[in-house]
Image (cartoon, rainbow, N blue to C red):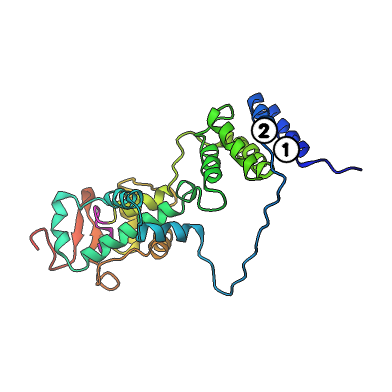
Amino acid sequence: MKRPKRAELDRELAKELADKCSPELLKAVVAAPLHAKKIQKQKKYSNLKQPSVADRVYDELEHPTSFALVEARRQLGLMILEPVPKVAWTKELDGYKDARISAENAIRRIWAATDAAQAGLEGDPWLGVCLHKVRAGLLAADSPELLRYIEHAQKIGKAEWFIERVTADLENAKKRVPSAPQFNQFRALLVVHWMRYLFWLMSDDLIARVVTTIKLKPDGCNRQTITRAVKELRLVKHPDTGCQPVVKALGEGGVFIFREGYSPQF
């Protein structure tokens, strides 16, 4: 049997997508110029562990090389809330600066793991951003913007791959919960309030109790989940927390009970 030409394959794939999503997509593929030239993929072998996409995003935020990255880093840093006025004196304690920096680094790690942060870093940047928008429900099947992406995929010889991905991602987008958070919500809230609610001065067990009391995200919160998050996000606490936490208990009405020698007048 004669193998179908690339143009015929592209049209068949486009037709499948058009039947499910939008007739306009078929017109775009048929009208776009075709390039039969194959793009060879070169395999690189290395004994060194390659950084993940999330690691690369985090590294870019650590060492910003553009105004956009500098602004993104600044905005993420602003998410870390200052201590509430009644405990503002804790900003003068040893280790506050290190704990604050660790929280800023942690929020960047959380962001770096999101689909939005990683969009466009692998493969063709333009198509990567498009697929993210489709998955996030930001781009509909009948959007003129999607047609331009398909034409671009044709020009660089990736029509077959791209159409298959768009088909799958459009289907997955239908299952996406509207307004679903991109961040790991529990960890993001923990980090955002790391300084505000004095988590950096508490044991992991007490953090879990406080989180549950103030209802930040009580479902599934316990000492184990806190310990794991603190370790993986590399959050820093007060130097004495391992033996004598500065905040030793939670009193009636949610009042913090401090270790002897520490008070609002410290």
Residue 198 in magenta? yes
Q: Please say if 41 is above or below 171.
A: below
SS for callout 1: helix
Residue visible at 51% across and 61% down in the picture: 52
Q: Amino acid at mark 1?
A: Asp
The Cα atoms of the two marked residues, 2 and 1, are separated by: 7 Å
Q: Please say if 205 is above or below 126.
A: below
SS for callout 2: helix
Using residue 188 as the reference point, say whether residue 94 is left or right of it: left
Q: Could you say which quadrant of the image residue 32 lies in?
A: top right
Give percent across and percent down for residue 78: 27, 49
Give percent across and percent down for residue 219: 43, 47
Which quarter of the rendering shows the N terminus? Answer: top right
Query: In this figure, which residue is indicated by the disc labeled 1?
Result: 10
Q: Amino acid at mark 2?
A: Val
Numbered range of the magenta stretch = 195-201
Residue 7 in magenta? no
Query: In this figure, which residue is indicated by the disc labeled 2?
Result: 29
Which quarter of the rendering shows the C terminus? Answer: bottom left
